[in-house]
Each structure stands twice: as structure tokens, then as C-alpha cells.
Amino acid sequence: MDIVKGFPATSQDHFQLNVTNIIKQAVQSFAKQEIASRKHDGTIFRYTYGDAYNRMGKLANALKELGVRTGDRVGVLAWNTHENYEIYFGVPGMGAVMLMLNLRLAPPDLSYVINHAGASVIIVDETLLPIAQAIVSLCPNVKTFIVITAKSIDNFADKLPNVVSYEDILAKADSQFPWPNLDEKSAYAACYTTGTTGKPKGVYYSHRNVYLHSCSIALNAEIALRDTVLQIVPMFHALGWGLSQASTMVGARQVFSGMYTLDKLGTLAELFVNEKVSVSAGAPAIFMPFLEYIRKLDPKPDLTGVRLLSGATEPPIAMMKGFAELTGAEVIHAYGATETTPLVTINRIKPWMESTISEEDRWDRKRKQGYCVNGLDLKVVDLSENPVPNDGKTAGELLIRGPWITGSYHEAPGSEAQFTADGYWRSGDVATIDEEGYVKITDRVKDVIKSGGEWISSVDMENEIISHPAVLEAAVVGVAHPKWQERPIALVVLRPEGRGKINVEDIREHLAAKFAKWQLPEAVFFVDTIPKTSVGKINKKVIREDYKETYASQTEIPPVGHSRT
Amino acid sequence: MDIVKGFPATSQDHFQLNVTNIIKQAVQSFAKQEIASRKHDGTIFRYTYGDAYNRMGKLANALKELGVRTGDRVGVLAWNTHENYEIYFGVPGMGAVMLMLNLRLAPPDLSYVINHAGASVIIVDETLLPIAQAIVSLCPNVKTFIVITAKSIDNFADKLPNVVSYEDILAKADSQFPWPNLDEKSAYAACYTTGTTGKPKGVYYSHRNVYLHSCSIALNAEIALRDTVLQIVPMFHALGWGLSQASTMVGARQVFSGMYTLDKLGTLAELFVNEKVSVSAGAPAIFMPFLEYIRKLDPKPDLTGVRLLSGATEPPIAMMKGFAELTGAEVIHAYGATETTPLVTINRIKPWMESTISEEDRWDRKRKQGYCVNGLDLKVVDLSENPVPNDGKTAGELLIRGPWITGSYHEAPGSEAQFTADGYWRSGDVATIDEEGYVKITDRVKDVIKSGGEWISSVDMENEIISHPAVLEAAVVGVAHPKWQERPIALVVLRPEGRGKINVEDIREHLAAKFAKWQLPEAVFFVDTIPKTSVGKINKKVIREDYKETYASQTEIPPVGHSRT
């Protein structure tokens, strides 16, 4: 889409949207605002925006002293702490690029990311030293390790080469740093995606991207000066969903959760209550066990008015209801991905819907991914790339563009197909969009069955098969068909009482209540187990490979299915 | 300040921050949100964001049909109505530049603005036809007048040349318009400043400027989807302070006040109550009489939780208290100018001040202009351009820079001095800044007395003279002095009972309690009246001219003053 130049304006458009301006301006107005950070010993460290800014200046000077230059990549293996907050502004502020490292990655993937990005320095928390040790021999280009620790650096000298202490180098540095006026299109940070196929791919966020995303997070989560924001989402996951930059922009009080693990739910409850948290964000993977923990507390923590942004997956209704009833907190679903910084949609019930929506519909609607936030442009398109009707039923692939969406993967040949000619990123998610603009993700594009130019949702079909009383588990995948491109097959695990009593036609008849005849799987296989991945998801890649010959010899509409058990 | 390029990011930074993207994205998510507009007959017209967007498309097509091209300037003489809202997006969206015309300007100034900007089309509300008629012969380059009226255009054919009806041209046009992807640095609109000296000067706002200012207004006024925002500030004053664009960005409900005059305060009260307004903005010039109107109402309107942004001048404490006590509304002072789009500072009491601030200090503090909003960079500098200490006492000139501050006046030779080499706009306001970053405007630079390298506030000195029981009025200006650059003179109007009893030394002694000896005026003139401007302000320009010879023959510290009455 060509950019059209109009009459020249006189605005100061040369002023750069970089994160140094975010923090400088926050300190100008909110120097005395508090930041609280949970240390590894469980105590709370407290200081102010002004103190943090001084240490950001020290960090920038120290990195310069270590030889870090504009454009160099600095890896970060850290928890949600005030040091990580300093890194968020100090590292990109001096012109380097922050490479956020996922501490759950295995050493081969982690070293691949470090080497692909070309990081020369790694900042590592002392508790994560084993990870650094595991990759050191695989990453010969890393010149320096900076350890975040309160102990003497002598304790680490034999564990890593060229190791210095974060506190030592800050102690020696000046707090005044001549922050460069960074081009807003310069890289601020990189996160690598960890898809199920292929190597991790690098998403490089610009300063402008982060600046505008911060505005959007603050506007949509309604973060203001009076709020206290708790950082639970790991700061290496899509920049911690942007909470700390957005909070800085409006001068909100910030709390960092520290070394956070699922066996410390009591700590989380304490932080919410003691620090008077009003906003936080996380995935159901953390909020579900947290709610279960709360169920056992007496009295329950009062979280009235607290907004919990829930992402990663659809929030279960029971979870949303549980938080509302037991604590008064509102769970608000938002959707995004590493490639989208991440905010794309947020789900608030619109004021004009309030008077007519039933209680049941409200919860059902709150599970949707929500409407597009201002700043972005999204559409759901069919296989011919035409937008589907906003009927809440017709599914297509969700495409997204805007200033905080990635436009390419860094040096990843072959990844160009994930972008359209007119600048949209293909999310890989199958979605519907309703008359009010609420998006609902129904499947992954790679899992949906493309048959005769139409799509069949594998997830919907699995759910319908499982609703049969004799069925324990089901998996549906598409496999190649010479005439129809793909046709569905179903793998079904029967409950013990159903074995031998249910046949292929029973499954097809059950499905016929919800699916058109052409959508029904011809082949249904009764199996003992369904292949799973290491994290317990159905391994559709393996199933597709195992069953790829199912329809290979068929050239017409295939006959009704068969069983191989 | 050189822009430093860093490592390239992969973000979609080519995505333009133009207002077409604001409205498109709002319609994508909030098509059914309501817009209410008060018509000239007092009834309320209602439609939706979706309806407005269709009419914006029609307007763009109609303008194209009339020959308007990218970069052309389109003058607007209109009230706060839904048509003006359509103009706000339809005119700049199609690539033209909206020239907002102040309907209070006299024909010579108005025609100067139209001719200087080179407007070829004027959109005029039917009630403002006399203004258009008064300038038509002065503006030969205006090719077309578009009248906003529900009547037949035949009624206007003999009143203006080349006249068409807004509704007629929209009725004939298609609602689908191929909105260009406008460069974010293109002009969105122009407003001309109307200073007391020289000709009006043009400030051209870019799309990017307006986009980022909208984010800032929404963040700082905390405008959200659930709000109803009433547009009282005329939309020709610094883009109506950005409320309508900010509201659009978050999908808030909008109410336009229509043809609003001070004799219709009942209408205003009705709009607040009937439309359940939660946010509005205006000057004390409107809020003061509105409060007096409310005082007489029984019962008082319940405006609990309503945020009233008050600008233009310092809000009187009595006004802020009055709204709080009688209605529950909170007056929030914000500061800016035409050159700043306008938001620069906003005054909220910071959370960490709440526990220690006394009731009296709270009101006193709320009169300050407030702290700098994120996105901007401000400083207060002394005569050597060095920042003054943040002590709330030392005054200097307020300098501001950022993406929504003007960088120059359009084709205004000689105006370059209003900008510093490092990109700040000189506000012309004298200010102090305190340890919490709150700015307080104390004077205008042109009115402050520059004596021996130091500043003396004319406003402070006037207030102190007026506090003398025998004094009715006072004016203090600086006039040229051969040795000290300037020295103050005071004009004093005595109350009848003080005449003949008070002399120059009495005034100097009274001032000595608050001012240093070197600051005291040598010359004090007892006069019958003080020259005023047409809007009732002290006309310091005239006083300076009349008294310019006062110290002309003095080369040392001058002798104690004299009187010429």
C-alpha cells in the first residue's frame, strides 16, 4: 500500500518514539513512584523510578565499558526483578538490543537462539547459572557473562568464563549516561518464537513498536497513575506482555514477582494483598492453580476491582467465575502472540450490550478473544483471501497488521510466506468474527482440514466425538486425498464399556447431528492410545505421518470408512 | 540532536499513524457505539460510529468531486456538531488539510488566515453565514462554500457565490471511499494562533501528531470505552483539545454540544444529566458561569465521578470547590496552547502525596498547571538557557518539545526565534517547577521585567499592590533602561477613599514586605484608569509604549520614583 505524502505539517515529527523518552519522561513527573521487587530470599526490595533510572544510567555506562556498542545483542536470562526492569531500559537505551531468553528452552535451542542472534554478552541471574553453564561451550561468541547476584563474584569465577557481577559493574559506573537519540525504527529487543516445527525464529521489536504498544496496553488495560501493577508473566515472554513499559508511561506503581514458580502460590497471594495490586496478567496455567490455592484459604483475599488480564489460551468459565465469586477480581481475556508484542484483541463487554446480555451469554462471550484494539487492523479471510462475513460462524485465517506486528522473521529464509503482499502477518489461527467484532479462535490453520476448498475444524469435530458417551478421547486430522486435497480421519479411544459395541457408522451418525455430510470423516480408527507431545498435547504431526496413506489410492469420493483395530 | 540508527527491527514500522487508521479501527470494534449531537432546534440527533464513518466516506467522495485534492486546505466555520466530527476524519482522511476557523475573529483577521493558508473551499454552518458573507470579497481564492443546513440550498444561493449544501453533496456520494495511506507526517489540520502582537501564525498538525496526542489525552484524562465524553471546547480551538479523536480511539460514547453560547447554560446542564456525561473539558470562562447557574438549581445535578478538564487559565479554587461540593464533579487542571495540540501538563494529586497533603494544600496544588505528560519533554530555563532548580520558586521560561509540539510556524518569517537549536518551542510562559515536577505559570515572558539579568514577575507585583487596602487596580510593566535593560513601573488606580492619601513611597514600602529592594519600581504612577484590551485584559503593549521614556535619561540606579497624576 503506497504511502501518500500530503501537505507538510510543522509538528516536531523528528522527535523519536524510543523507550528512553518513556523512562526519562516518567522520571520527570514520577521520580518518587515506588517499585517493589521480590528477592530470592522472599524479602521485598523497594526503590523509586528515580533510583531505577540512576541504575539504568550506571548499567549503560558499564556495558559501554565492557565494549557493548550500538546494535550489539545482549542476552538476558532472568526472573521478573527490578534488575530486569533496569535492563529493559538500560540495555536498549544505550543502543544495544535486548535478547530475551526463555529459561525453559533446552540447551540446543537456547544456544541456537544465542548464536543466531549473535549475542556477545549474557546477563544471567545467579539461580540460572546451570543454564548458562550448559550453553557456554555451544556459544563461543559470547564474550562476557554478567551475573545478577548479591554475593562476591569470586563464587562464580570457576563456573563461567569472563564473568563479572552486575552489582560490581554498576557500583563502579557513573549514573549519568549520554543517552543517544535512537531512531525509533531501531531494534529494542528480540524474542524468538518456539513453534512446534522448525528452529526458533527471531522477532525483532523496534523502539516505536514498543512505544505504541505501551500506549495500547495502558489504554486497554486502563492502567493509570493510581494503579499497582504486578508483573507475573515472565519478562522473556513477548516482553512480559508490555506491562512494565505501559506502567512506566503512566507512572503506575510496579511490583515484580521475582523468582516465581508454581509451588509458591502463597507468595503470589501475599503480593496481591500486601502490595495492594490492582492490575496483573498471566495465563490460565498460572491463574488456575492460583485459584485452587485461594479456594483453600480462609478468609479469601479481597481482590475487588483487580483486573487480571488472561492470555495464552482461552480462559475457562469456571476460572473467571471463581475469581469473581471468591475474590472480586475480574478476569479479562486478551489475545496475542510473540509476533504481535503481544496485544491484538481484548474482551470487555461493550456498554450497549450490558442491558440485554444474559448472565450465561456474558460468560460465554467473555471466553472469546475479544475485539481488535485501536492501532491495529485485523481480518479473517477464507482460502481465497477474501474476508469472511462477520457472522460469528464462518471461519478463516486471522491476519493482522499494525505498528507493533512483526513484518518478517529475522534472517529466516522461507518464512516470507507468513506475510501477505499487503503487509498482514498470517497468525496461523483459524477464527470467526461476530457482528460486534469479537474474534473467536477455533483452531490452528495447520490442524484444520482443507477439503474441496472448504475448511473443517479439527477441534470442533474432536469435541463432538468426545461428547459421545462411549468415547474417552479423540483426535481428528486431515490427510492427503488425490481429489479433495485433504479429508479428515478420526482416531477414537473408547471407554472400556464401549469397546466392541461402537462402530464407524455410530461415530459418523453422532457427528451428523452437527456436521454436514461432506464434512464427516470416511476413516475412523479405534485405537488404544493417541500420540501425545511432551507437554501432553495431541501430536497431530505424528498422526498425519502415520496415516498419510489412508486415502492415497482414492480418486473419487471415498467409500465409508474402515477400522484397523 | 542527531538521530542514532541501531540494529534493524522487523516491526511493521511502515504502518502509518494517520487518523484514517484511528476511525477505521474504531468502526471495526465499536461500529454500534452512539454519537449524540445537539441540533440548532434543541433536539438531539443520534447515530453510531458506523453511520458516521459512512458519511465520512460520502464527504470524502463529495470533496473529490468538487475538485479537492491531496494537500488542499478546506476551511471550517462550524459549531460542535456531528457534521464537524465527520469533517474531522473525512477532510484530512481524503488527504486535504482541515483549516479550523475561529468564529470569534474579526473579518480582516479571518480573511488573513484563509488567504495565508490558501483555502479553496469553506464549510460553513448556516448560522454563521454572516461571517462567510463578511469575508467573501476579501478571499477571492475561495472557490466553493459548503453550507451545513437542513434547508434547501436555494435559500442561500443569493448570499454566497458557488454555494452547495453539505447534505446534498453527501446524498449524491458513495459511502465507500478509497482512503489513501497517508504519510503520518502529512498535515492533518491547521489552527492559527491569535497572539496580541502581529498577524495570526499558522500551526500545522501532522497526522502522527494528532494520533499520539489522542493516545495521551485518552491516557491522562483516562477516557475509556465506558465513558461518555461531552465536547464543549470549540472544535476550532486547538482541535477541541483532542477529545473527539481520543474518544474515537477508545470507542467512548460522544456528545456534541451544538451551537453553544453562554445564555444556554440550562442546555449544558441538561446534556450533562440526560446524556450521563462522564468526561468533559472547558475553560473557567464557561465553567464559572455554569457553576453559578447550578447554584440556583434545586435539586443540583448529580455529576458524581465526572471529570472536568479545565484549561486556558488557572482554575479558581472557589470554582473547583464549588463543583466538588455542589455536584460531585472533579475539576482537573491541564495546560497547553495551540502550538502544543494542546496537552502538555495535567494536575492529578499523586498517590504517594495523598496521605500527607492537607486539605488547604490540596486545593492550592490543584491550581498549578501540573506535571508533564509522558511523550513530552519540558524544562524551565533561566536567561542563560540553563534549567532552573526544581524548587517551586525559581522562575524561568517554559520550553517544550515532543511529537505533538509545533516545530515552526508555517511561512512566518521572523518566528524562528521561538524555537531553540535543540528543538524546544519557547512557550512564552514564565514558570516555576517544584520537586514533584508540578509546573506553575507565573507570568508571560513578554510581561516579565528583565532587570540586570534577573526576572521580576509583573503579575506577582500587581497582586501585591492590589492587596494594599487603598488600591483598586494596578498594572506593572517593564520599560527600557539604559543600564539595567528594563526596570518596572507601576500604574495604580486608588479607591476613592485613598486618593491624595497614598504616595509612591507607601506603595514601595508595601511591596518591600515581599520583594527585594532592587526589584521595587522606582516609578509609580497614580492614574484614573488602566488601558485594557477588547477582552478586558490589561493592555501592557499600550502601557509600555506610553511610558517608554520613563527611564530613558538614566544611566545609574535611578532615583526614587515620581508621579505624573
Image (cartoon, coloured by chain):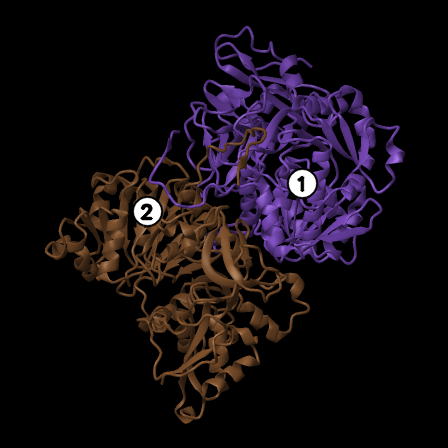
Chain colours: A purple, B brown
Q: Name the residue at 61% across, 12% down.
A: A548
**CA separation in Å, label 1 and label 2:** 41 Å
Q: Which residue is mark 2?
A: B411
Residue type pointed to by label 1: Gly
Q: Nearer the viewer, mark 1 or mark 2?
A: 2
Identify whether A42 is placed above or below B389: above
Left-right relation of B200 to A329: left
Residue type pointed to by label 2: Glu
Q: Name the residue at 56% across, 33% down.
A: A186
Left-right relation of A120 to B56: right
Q: Nearer the viewer, residue A326 or A51?
A: A51
Q: Quadrant of the N terminus of chain A?
A: top left
What label sits on residue A90 in the rendered view?
A: 1
Neighbour tally class for label 1: few under 14, some 14-19, many 20 plus, Cα within 10 Å? many
Task: Give the chain of mark 1.
Answer: A
What label sits on residue B164 in the rendered view?
A: none
Q: Secondary structure at mark 2?
A: loop
Residue farthest to the top, as pictured: A553
Identify whether B479 is placed above or below B11: below
Q: Name the residue at 40% across, 43% down.
A: B207
Please provide percent x and percent y for residue B317.
51, 74
| Total marks placed | 2
Does the rendering let one see residue B224? no
Callout 1 and callout 2 share a chain: no
Left-right relation of B333 to B266: right
Q: Name the residue at 48% across, 14% down.
A: A484
Residue farthest to the left, as pictured: B158
